[in-house]
Image (spheres, grey):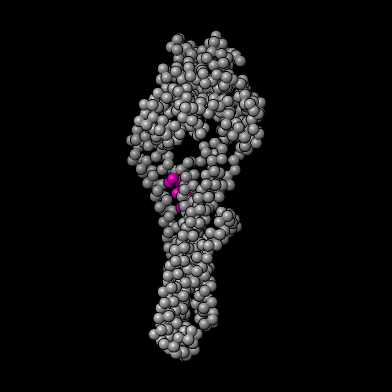
Amino acid sequence: MNSDEVTGLKRLWKYAGPHRPQVIAAIFHTTMGKVMDVVPEILIGAVLDVIVRGQGSFVATQFGIADRWQQLLVLATANLFAWIFESLFGYWSAISWRNLAQTIEHEMRDQLYRHVQSLEVSWFEDNTSGGLLSVLNDDINQLERFLDGGAASILQVFWNIVLVGAMFAVSSWLLTLLAFLPIPIIVAGSIRYQKRLEPLYARVRESVADLSATLTANLSGIQTIKAFTAEDREAARVAEVSDAYRQANRDAIRFSSAFVPLIRMAILAGFTCTLVVGGWLVLNNRMEVGIYAVLVFMTQRLLWPLTRLGETLDLYQRAMASTRRIFGLLDVRPVMKEGSQPLVEPVRGEFELRDVTFGYGDGPDILHGITLRVPAGESHAIVGATGSGKSTLVRLLLRFHDARQGEVLLDGQDVRHLSYASLRGAMGYVSQDVFLFHGTVRDNIAYGRPDSRPEEIEAAAQAAEAHEFILSLPNGYDTIVGERGQRLSGGQRQRISLARAILRDPAILVLDEATSAVDNETEAAIQRSLARVTQGRTSVVIAHRLSTVRDCHRIWVLERGRIIEAGTHDELIAHGGLYAALWRVQTGEAVKVHPTASPIR
Ligand code: ATP
Ligand code: MG
């Protein structure tokens, strides 16, 4: 066992800590079960003793029962009770361990999920959701399998050695020595084996993660796969990854299966010794037949369960491979530190970027020295070519990422000092790739304020021009939208997520292409209600369709991560720069760009 494992086990034990009474109950049940398990063997010896010695038997002398038949009946009754209690304790023991395993599994999954959820956005960009799923699901289940059977099994082996050992010790020292001889060999062998299994199981876990990642990605991209008739190719790819998993397992299986036969050999040697030497002792009247019989049965009892040690260690090794992955994930620390300050009430909703430079990961700068201010209550727009950095810019407002240089301020407070609850709580955000949860339309709209009243939900839907179409759905507001909202059209999804942001009644609305998928008419209607909704509320709107933003207080034009123009619609048109050119293209007027026009601010 290396130090890594010791800390792993210690941390695992910490989860069991609060459930100590259950642990003790489980240990008690297993122990009693084991004691009851040994009793019949002793009784068999006593029966033989009765038959061989009669009046002088152990039962006769100790309990004063003279009649042999009665002696037998007493022993048979005792045996019956021993079996009944063994079954009962076995049942209780299974229940206690399994429930304990379930509880620990549940708590770990809960903690792990919370932890993963607290990690920053960029971390998720670097990790596949399938890989994460394999840890959250598979690895935790693996752990459960060990806790389920492994702990009880180790305990049983322990009690076996103690109880049987005690009986041997009072009977014959020579036989004790012989019977116990194989144990150190078996234990030493097991540990060596287990060491060599470790890397094999680590590989198995990695290939599970690969498999899970591939499957998750493929299932969510099923339409693309079909559209490009790539089914065969994808099936082959999945088969390949699955085969790698099988291969990794095969190596582990081959190795772990050789273990039990090896242990059996060691056991057989010990058993044969007891049989021969004990028989010799009886023949020479140095030992009672009853005791001999008990010892022969006991040797079986002692040694055969040790074969299970192999299985248990195997489970343990698998569990440790999983535990390492689980704790590895738990040890990932967010790079971004959440601030602790609340926003000063009342929230005004003024935004400012001061000379902000940003890039993803180790990549090049995406935004260069951006300085912009959105005064409280104003509607501002960000426009620019695709890939110019618009979405990136608003993600900085929500602090999904931190700027490399410069400051992002909300109401004059650096967003890095604010708690996420107060920063993000002040915002209603409609992201460019709309996401709906599997559930009803109502639940999706109320996502940011689950306690909203039905009238409020409808009012928000009305403002987002969603009310009408929702009523026409099969179950109205109670219609299930399907996974990721796939039962709705793109424009419908957008309007629901817009309603979701509006319902939150935030100080700041951040809309990233929130109306890109709706028709012109609907858009005009949304525009009118948004004008009402954004009255006296700060809003930051990203749009490709410039008609959407022409009434904004100020329009910022982004090009390759730089602000090249800013002003009202009229100012920008008069300026005759990029915006004016784009406007002419969209309104169908002459297409001519003035690349030489100087930026205005
Ligand atoms: P669009 O109008 O198409 O939505 P955009 O202006 O919103 O474009 P952004 O999404 O901000 O553009 O992307 C700006 C640049 O940043 C692009 O070059 C893109 O490749 C890069 N980028 C965006 N997201 C990431 C990311 N998570 N990791 C690395 N690079 C990214
Ligand atoms: Mg974008």
Quarter the C terminus occupies: top right
Report if residue 207 lies within the magenta region: yes
Q: Nearer the viewer, residue 485 or 330?
A: 485
Q: Tell me residue 399's x, y (percent).
A: 58, 32
Q: Nearer the viewer, residue 374 or 309?
A: 374
Marker count (numbered)? 0
Q: Is residue 322 above or below residue 477?
A: below
Report if residue 43 lies within the magenta region: no
Residue 371 seen in the current view: yes
Instruction: Give me the residue at 46% from left, 32% from top.
Output: 444
Residue 355 seen in the current view: no
Instruction: Give me the residue at 43% from left, 55% from top.
Output: 249
Q: Quadrant of residue 462?
A: top left
Q: Tell me residue 295's x, y (percent).
A: 47, 80
Q: Tell me residue 353's x, y (percent).
A: 62, 25
Q: Is residue 400 above or below residue 266?
A: above
Instruction: Give me the residue at 54% from left, 60% from top.
Output: 23
Q: Is residue 47 above or below residue 184?
A: below
Quarter the N terminus occupies: bottom right
- Main SS of the magenta part reads helix
Magenta region: 203-212
Q: Tell me residue 130's x, y (percent).
A: 46, 43
Instruction: Give me the residue at 45% from left, 34% from top.
Output: 443
Q: Quadrant of residue 413?
A: top right
